[in-house]
Amino acid sequence: MTNIQITTSLNTKTAIPSTKELRALFKGRVIAPGDPEYDKARTVFYGGIDRRPAAILRAQDAGDVARLVSLARETGVELAVRSGGHSVAGHSVTEGGIVLDLSGMKSLKIDARLRTAWAETGLTAGEYTLAANAYGLATGFGDTGSVGLGGLTLGGGVGYLVRKYGLTIDDLLAAEIVTADGRLLRVDDKTHPDLFWAIRGGGGNFGIATRFQFRLHDVATVVGGMLILPATPGAIAGFIAEAQAAPDELSTIANVMIAPPMPFLPAEVHGKPVIMAMLVYAGDAEQGNGVVAPFRALASPLADMIHVMSYPEIYQEEGGEYHPVAAAHTMFIDSLDRSMAEMILDQLAASTASMAVTQIRVLGGAMARVPAEATAFAHRSARIMVNIAALYEKPEEKPVHQAWVTGFAKALHQGNDGAYVNFLGDEGQGRVQDAYPGATWERLRTIKRRYDPSNLFRLNQNVPPAEKDG
């Protein structure tokens, strides 16, 4: 479907239609306050977000999406878009507006011969990965199976195959997207190339993606899993050094934290600093075992769950009622030596949060070989991404934990103000600009003016449209 104009008969800036009228307008399920499933449908992944939308549309198809976009444009109602509901800033739900819930749109068509797939954006990373694995294929997404493909892809996509195959957007071949004027456009590098450039990292600012076409790679099994080591300055610095020296087939995530009382850890380790790492080697199993051996040798492992597995197994089972509340900060650094590792351990020891974590991801590889100007994700040369988080339970504790996060980030700062947009919270316009450095910001604003001049799609890490000339 290309360039289809779908409109409603609603008058400009009218009141939101009644629930009865909404249900007559859409094919999908309209959930309203008072419906039995309303509270569950408005709940998002992260805790501390309690918003009550006027209605939730669980869209059935792209036509539903286009009709709701037209309704939002004509009434002025705030529109929230939800794929998996994992927006750190809570953008997946609105207070008093309408939520477009894409979770009912899960069509997936895999062409194993061409190594491509068309996926609707209500699919989760786990659902897509499991289906693709039946053909021995995979596309690189994030590190959590329940994250929706829509938001993950539009922000970039940094996951377990990032060094081997790049970001998720590096395997995005085309997309179908409903723009602010109600059109359903197919975009790729030849058709609406400016819009295609913008949606590869620019978030949900330019329209609502209903389908993506992805490239698939031969990834049936990997050598991967969790490795837990005691966290000493030498072990932390050594882990990062090994991750940087490893071949592109290996991607790692190291969580330096105080060990919670997990059943597979000895009781004497609980409350002690550990490196809880996830490693994925996408290549020959024998070679993979050789690559992970130096990590095991950094210290006597407290838990070693690395083994040959089907790729979908890397997505660990998640608790359905887990809704964390955290103060957090995402950033890029160039290096991490022993002295910095000591500082990280000191900072973690000083935190009063119920759980404090420093997550360290070594980047590079295929991600870094794409020119920075090729997509709206401009952090191609970033060497290490660090995410700091302090989890807490009582709202009144937020200032204390936010101050700790802010001070910690300042101590880690190495001159790079950049940020990964998918890990940003509600941190203000300046931090959104940090996600799009240099000429990227102005180019995004120009494209925003072309496709969404009224900023209809504003409940996101917002890029405002450029001002008109003159």
Image (cartoon, rainbow, N blue to C red):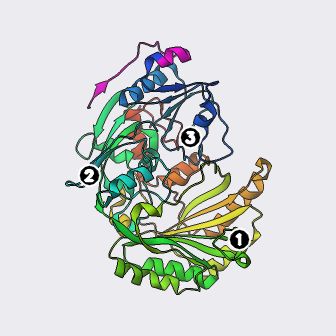
The residue located at (60%, 29%) in the rendering is 53
- Expressed as whole percent of the image width and height from the top left, the position of residue 382 reads 45, 66
- Circle 1 — which element? helix
Label 3 near label 2: C-beta < 8 Å?
Answer: no
Magenta stretch prevailing secondary structure: loop
Q: In 3D space, how far apart are the residues under numbered discs 3 and 1 (Cα atoms)?
A: 30 Å
Residue under label 3: 91
Q: Residues within 10 Å of mark 2 (few under 14, many from 20)?
A: many
> Dot 3: what SS?
loop
Q: Which amino acid does label 1 sit on?
A: Gln
Rendered residue at 64%/49% (across/down): 323
Image vertical order of residue 249 relative to residue 76, above or below? below
* Residue where numbered disc 2 is placed: 116
The residue tagged 1 is 347
Q: Identity of the amino acid at label 3?
A: His
Dot 2: element: strand
Residue 380 spot, x, y in % from top left: 40, 63
